[in-house]
Amino acid sequence: MKQFINKILGKKLTGKLRLIKESCNAQLVHTCSKTRFLSSLYYFAFNSSFKRENQSVLHGKHLYKESLTQVGRSSALLRRNIHRLEKGLIMRPRREIFAKDYILETVEQFERCVALNTIERNEMEWANDVLTEYFDSIIINGEKSVEKAYHIFSKASSVYLERDRSLSKDFKFIPYSRESSLQSNISYEELKKLFLQRRSVRWFDQDKKVEAQSLMDAIELASLAPSACNRQPFKFYFTVDQNKAREIAKIPMGTAGFADNIVALIVIVGDLSYYPYERDRHVIYIDASLAAMQLMLALETLGLSSCPVNWPDIESFEVKMEKKLGLTKNLRPIILLPVGYADLTGLIPSSSKKSSSELAVQI
């Protein structure tokens, strides 16, 4: 279409019209940025950039509501509330009773998850252990909603434990003291070496195949990254098929010039169905980024290099990625990560970083 317009109007006139359009838009931006109402009007009438995000957030809210009864391998509500209980258990001083406003919905969801028997084992063990610790730690003292929750949990937990008798284990998924946590021997200097070793590598050894298990091992370590309320609202879509990796990697703009050198690829995708409120729509980017950094460092320890590629929110790219990965509207691509064994003769940008004195602001 652009080529047709250029041909009809000529490059000179087209250039002038473009300048006029940019000038008008700049004025609109200046005016509409002054109030929230005008800002909303601008994005409603003059700019459609947020339409996909708006639909994604709403579709996520819809799926969250559905997930309360149609539980899959994970329950967003259960994960969030169990984490909230853990935070209550570690408080100083710990209150005699807490979580009165959400304990009933928590155990009702636990009961539902036990009945459906679809939740991943680790999640159910964690929920059962924390709920047991909660009821062992509080003083119900006539609180009817908490008493009701206790009876519901007792029955559901008995069903769960009876069904999974193999759950006998030497530890419980409950809060523990810092002094008993696992300690590494990694020094500041050794960690710094790993950080400096991790660079954005774009040239990969074409003779060395990346094994799927290596990516799974790295993803296992990435899953240990911190996550708001431990919801972990993301998935790692990956392929070790060179043709698939290159085809998908060519969708965004950030791989121009080296896409045909990629041998494996991970696409980190955020899931908005973990959130019932718009206020949390950005958490998928925060949590996925935390996991992505651990993923890249984990890859380095396995001898694999990577290069994080920005995902631009451009509708035509979104449509292509949606089709390639089979994404529903609540799923948003966040980062593409080409992976492979580095071509040792390939060059790497030095990318001098800002100093800590430039970045740090003491308050």
Image: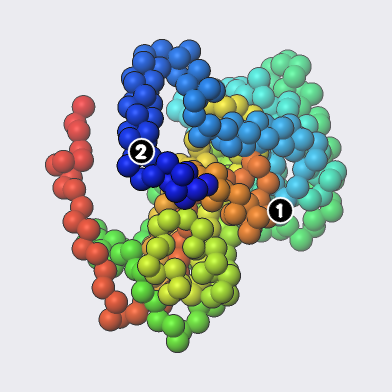
Q: Residue 351 at x, y = what percent?
A: 22, 58
Query: In what quadrant of the picture does the C terminus appear?
Result: top left
Give 223 or 186, whichever is nearer the viewer: 223
Give left or right: position of 90 versus 26: right
Q: Position of residue 16 (x, y in %)?
A: 33, 35
Q: Is residue 24 visible?
A: yes
Q: Nearer the viewer, mark 1 or mark 2?
A: 2
Q: Position of residue 11 (x, y in %)?
A: 36, 45
Q: Which residue is mark 1?
A: 120
- Seen at 36% across and 24% down, the residue is 24
Determine the CA span between mark 1 and mark 2.
62 Å
**Mark number for residue 13?**
2
Residue at position x 49%, y 63% in the image: 250
Depth order, front residue of 56/188: 56
Q: Residue at x 40, y 81 (%)?
A: 205
- Look at the numbered disc 1 and give the secondary structure of its residue: loop
Which amino acid type corresponds to the residue marked 1 in the rendered image?
Answer: Glu
Asked whether residue 220 appears in the rendered view, the answer is: no
Residue 330 in the image: above or below residue 29 = below
Look at the picture and state if 34 lies above or below 304.
above
Up-down: is 136 above or below 177?
A: above
Give the class, few, some or many, for how many residues have Cα within 10 Å of label 1's Cα (few <14, many ≥20).
few
**Above or below, 243 relative to 9:** below
